[in-house]
Amino acid sequence: MILRRMSLAAALLFCAGAAFAQTALPPLRTGVDGTFAPHAMPKLGGGIEGFQVDLFTEAARRMHRDIVIESTSFSGLIPGLQAGRYDFIAAPTTATKERAENMLFTSGYLWTAYEFGIKKGSAPIKGWEDLKGKAVAVNKGTPYETLSRSMAEKIGLTVQVYDTQPDATQAVLSGRAYATLGGNTVIKYAASKNPQFVADLVLQDTKAHWAAPFRKDSVALRNQMQDALDCMKKDGTIAKLSEKWFGVAPAADDLERVVTPGYGVPGMPGYDPTPHELKCQG
C-alpha cells in the first residue's frame, strides 16, 4: 500500500512537471546596439551592460519571463523584428509616425532630445544664435550633423564632423570646437564621466518618446510589457536606473516617472486610449 501511494505521488509530480514544462513561456528575444554607451556596451569579462539591459531584464522578470538580449547593429533590429527573430526591440527607438504605422509601441520610458555639451567655464548656450562664428562638433551621419549643417547655412557657424560621439566630445574638451550636439542621454553620460564637460541646452522642439516596438500582431505582449514598465515608473525603478547610467536624477515630468494613459504613445498610430487598471507586483 505504501509503495502504491509513493508511486501515485511520483506519477502526480511527473504529470505536474510535464504540464508546467508545456505551459512555461519561452524567453523573450530582443536586441540592442551593443556599442551605444551607456544604453548598451561591452562588459568586462564578456557580455553587455547598460541602461537598456537593466531596464528590460527587470521588465522581463516582472512578466515572469527570461530574456535573451543580442548585441547587433541597429540597422538590423527592425527587419529582425518584422521577420520574427525578435519579440520586441530593446534598443532605444524613437516613436515616429512612420514607424508607428508599421509597429506597435509601448508608451515612452525616456525622452530623447538633442542636447548641446560644452566645456566647463564656457558661456551657456541660450539658442543657436549664440553659436554664430563658432564651431560645433557632431558625430558623422547622424541627425545632429544634418541639423547643424542646416543651421550653419542660416546663422554662420562651422560644423566639425567626427567618426564617433566621444571624438566630438574630445574636440570640445581640447578647444577645437565650442560645443557638440548629440543625444541628451549620451551628453549627460559624458558629463557624468568628465567634470570638465557640461551638459547644456536641450532643444525642446526635438523631444520625442523612446519606446519599445513590437510587431502589429503582438498587442497582448506589448500591453504586458507596458504594464511592467509602468509599474517600474510608479515604484521609482526606472528613475533609479536613469540616475545610475546617466548621472542625473529625472525630473518629476520626465518619462522615467510619468505614466501616460492607455497603451502606446499618445497621438501616434496604434495608440489605444482605453483606460486600464494597473496591477503591480514586485
Image (tube, rainbow, N blue to C red):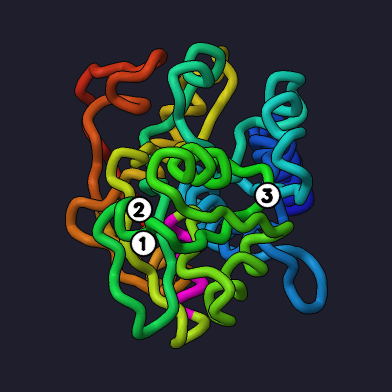
Magenta stretch in the rendered image: 184-192
* 276 relative to 63 in the view: left or right: left
Mark 1–mark 3 distance (CA, rounded to whole Å): 34 Å
Residue 60 part of the magenta segment? no
* 49 relative to 186 in the view: left or right: right
Q: Residue 90: which quarter of the image?
A: top right
Q: Nearer the viewer, residue 1 or 92?
A: 92
Mark 2–mark 1 distance (CA, rounded to whole Å): 5 Å
Q: Alpha-carbon neighbours of circle 1 within 10 Å: few (<14), some, or many (≥20)?
A: some
Residue 185 part of the magenta segment? yes
- Give the x, y percent position of residue 165: 62, 61
Q: Which mark is residue 140?
A: 3
Q: Which mark is residue 232?
A: 2
Can residue 27 be seen from the camera position used here?
A: no
Give the residue type at disc 3.
Lys
Residue under numbered circle 1: 237
* 73 relative to 95 in the view: left or right: right
Q: Give the residue drawn at x 71%, y 63%.
A: 48
Q: Which mark is residue 274?
A: none
Magenta stretch, main secondary structure class: helix
Residue 262, compared with residue 138, is above or below; it is above
Which tag, 2 or 1, sits closer to the chain's start? 2
Residue 168, compared with residue 183, is above or below; it is below
- Give the x, y percent position of residue 177: 53, 69
